[in-house]
Structures are given as C-alpha cells and as structure tokens.
Image (cartoon, rainbow, N blue to C red):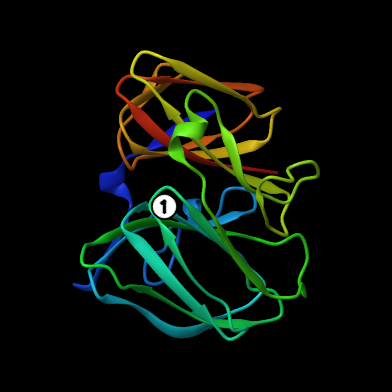
Amino acid sequence: MIEVRKFADLGKSNHGWLDANFHFSFAEYFRQDRLHWGALRVWNDDKIAAKSGFPPHPHENMEIITYVLEGAISHRDSLGNEGRTKAGDIQVMSAGTGITHAEYNLEDEQTHSFQIWILPDRQGHAPSWGTREFPRGERAGRFEVLASGREGDDDALTIHANARVLGATVAAGESVTYELGGRKGYLVPARGKIEIDGQVAETRDGVAIADVDVLTVKALEDAELVMVETA
C-alpha cells in the first residue's frame, strides 16, 4: 500500500513566528485516520522565524527527533544540555520520565525543520539528548540510518523505539532501494519530486507505506528524502 498525502492537505497552523504543517493529528488539528503510523505519532513540518522559537516546556515518554533542513536550531534543557544543530543534521531527545527544554532559532534567517515523534518501546526511560553531524554528501544514492533503536546501528543516534529514522539524497533519474520487510514506512521528500510504484510525490508531501518488502524510490528531480521505518 502506497498513499501519497499532499502537502496542501496537511493540517495547518500559522502563528506568525511559526508556520506549522501537521502530517498527523496534533494540537488543534484532528483527523481520526491520521492519529499515527505504527509507532510514528507526529511529523511536523515547521518554519520558524529568525530570532524566535519555543520557550521552555515539558515532555515525557516520547522519542523526539528534529531533522534540520535549513538554518539551525539551538537547544537547552533541564539536564543542562545545550547545543546547536544545523542544516542536514539531526538531534534526538528521549523525554523518558520527564524533561523540560527550549528550542530557539537564534539565526538571522528562517529555520525549516521536521520534528518527528516516535512512541517509545516502554515508559520510564531516563531522559537524554544528543546531536550529530550527518553530511548530506555521505548518503548519496543510499539510505543512511540517522537515529535508531535497533541493534547494530551503532553509528546512529540512539532512540528507545523499534524504529529507524533514515535519510538519502538521490540524483534526478536515479533510484534508491530499502528493505522494509513488510514493516511500515513514512517518507517525505524534503526537496525534489519522486515516484514510488507509479505514484508521484512532490516536495513536502508525505508517503505512507505498508505491506512492501523492498521499497524503490525513483527521483524525478534531485531529491532529499527523510523516512521513518517502524513496526
């Protein structure tokens, strides 16, 4: 099953400093048929104005991954962690038993990011935060594991979930494959136009995937892909 969810049909919320687009039910946006996709609970496509952001607020029992597309995000939390994650890289926060954090765009330009929430494998993990550089050029023509709760993914940031967050860049006319093995996938082209099994998805569309053993994605334009694989 391949279902393309057009960007224009996503939930919308514009606060001036924040232009948010919701792939799944979130805040005031509710759709019964878009509550989650396996353990994937939230995928927000956020544009944050320069010199603005989210003041301190709490989370618990959620794996929160931020993939920065443009600009940078600066993080500070109640554990004493501080850091800046720039375009192409990701940060992971395991909220666990509870954490308070702030996320600001301290840059002179707009920041564009995907914020992805994944349900943990159990409640009560110790909270943590981390960030890592993942050069876009090193994932050309293949999916690179950026964050994972699966054994063997030692080069990825750790999440407490039976899931992976992956990224790939694909040149126009080329294809990239990934073995889903029947697990669920949710894929968003951060840029570019792609084709999956005859269906076309454009920049910032979502593609819900199920019951597929080997996923093949063809780039109709130079493309940057972000995907969550989950049970």
Q: Is residue 50 above or below residue 168?
A: below
The local secondary structure at tag 1 comes to: loop
Residue 21 visible: no
User: Which quadrant of the figure contains the C terminus?
Assistant: top right
* Amino acid type at mark 1: His
Relative to 56, 104 lies left or right: left
The picture places residue 42, in percent across and down from the top left corner, at 50, 59
Front-lying residue, 7 or 82: 82
Q: Is residue 49 above or below residue 113?
A: below
Front-lying residue, 43 or 88: 88
Relative to 88, 216 lies left or right: right
Relative to 199, 52 lies left or right: left
User: Which quadrant of the figure contains the N terminus?
Assistant: top right
Relative to 6, 3 lies left or right: right
Residue 219, located in which quarter of the rendered image?
top left
The picture places residue 176, in percent across and down from the top left corner, at 51, 21
Q: What residue is drawn where x is 68% and y is 35%?
A: 183
Q: Residues within 10 Å of mark 1 (few under 14, many from 20)?
A: many
Q: What residue is drawn where x is 33% and y is 51%?
A: 10
Q: What residue is drawn where x is 70% and y is 74%?
A: 96
Q: What residue is drawn where x is 45% and y is 33%?
A: 137
Name the residue beneath numbered marker 1: 23
Residue 91 visible: yes
The picture places residue 214, in percent across and down from the top left corner, at 63, 20
Q: Is residue 212 above or below residue 12?
A: above
**Outermost right residue:** 151
